[in-house]
Amino acid sequence: MSTYSRSNGSNDMGCLLTALLVAVCIFVPLVGHIFLTVMIVGDDLSNSEKLLWLLLVWLVPVAGPLLYLLLGQKRNRLL
């Protein structure tokens, strides 16, 4: 019986770590997308450019935000 209780405890810890990992994998990108959305809306782009960047950021999960950060920002933001 003692091996069963040890096994059950490790399964609980595994479930907790899995749930934590899933939460981080969902929460971190979502916060990043929201942050980029605020940046895009606040940037001085035309409305059509803003819409295109927002679509790219939200519909292309990894490449969209990376492309906006590399190419889409106005250079005066850095100065």
Image (cartoon, grey):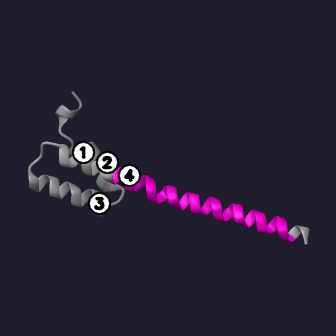
Out of 62 and 24, give the one closest to the viewer.
Answer: 24
Q: CA distance from mark 1 to mark 4?
A: 12 Å
Q: CA distance from mark 4 to mark 2?
A: 6 Å
For mark 3, give the secondary structure: helix
**Marks 1 and 2: in contact by CB < 8 Å?**
yes
Residue holding disc 4? 31
Name the kind of residue labelled 1 in the image. Met
- Magenta part of the protein: which range? 4-33
Of the image marks 3 and 4, the number of the one nearer the N terminus: 4
- Most frequent secondary structure within the magenta stretch: helix
- Write down the quadrant of residue 59 in the picture: bottom left
Name the kind of residue labelled 3 in the image. Trp
Left or right side of 57 for 1: right
Tell me the mark number nearer the camera, choosing from 3 and 4: 4
The quarter of the rendered structure image containing the C terminus is: top left
Above or below, 48 relative to 43: below
**Marks 3 and 1: in contact by CB < 8 Å?**
no
**Marks 2 and 4: in contact by CB < 8 Å?**
yes
For mark 1, give the secondary structure: helix
Name the kind of residue labelled 2 in the image. Phe
Residue holding disc 2? 35
Q: Residue at x 56, y 58 (%)?
A: 21
Tell me the mark number nearer the camera, choosing from 1 and 3: 1
Q: Residues within 10 Å of mark 4 (few under 14, many from 20)?
A: few
Residue holding disc 3? 58
Q: Residue at x 21, y 42 (%)?
A: 73
Q: CA distance from mark 3 to mark 4?
A: 12 Å
Tell me the mark number nearer the camera, choosing from 2 and 3: 2
Residue holding disc 1? 39
Q: Residues within 10 Å of mark 3 (few under 14, many from 20)?
A: some
Of the image marks 2 and 3, the number of the one nearer the N terminus: 2
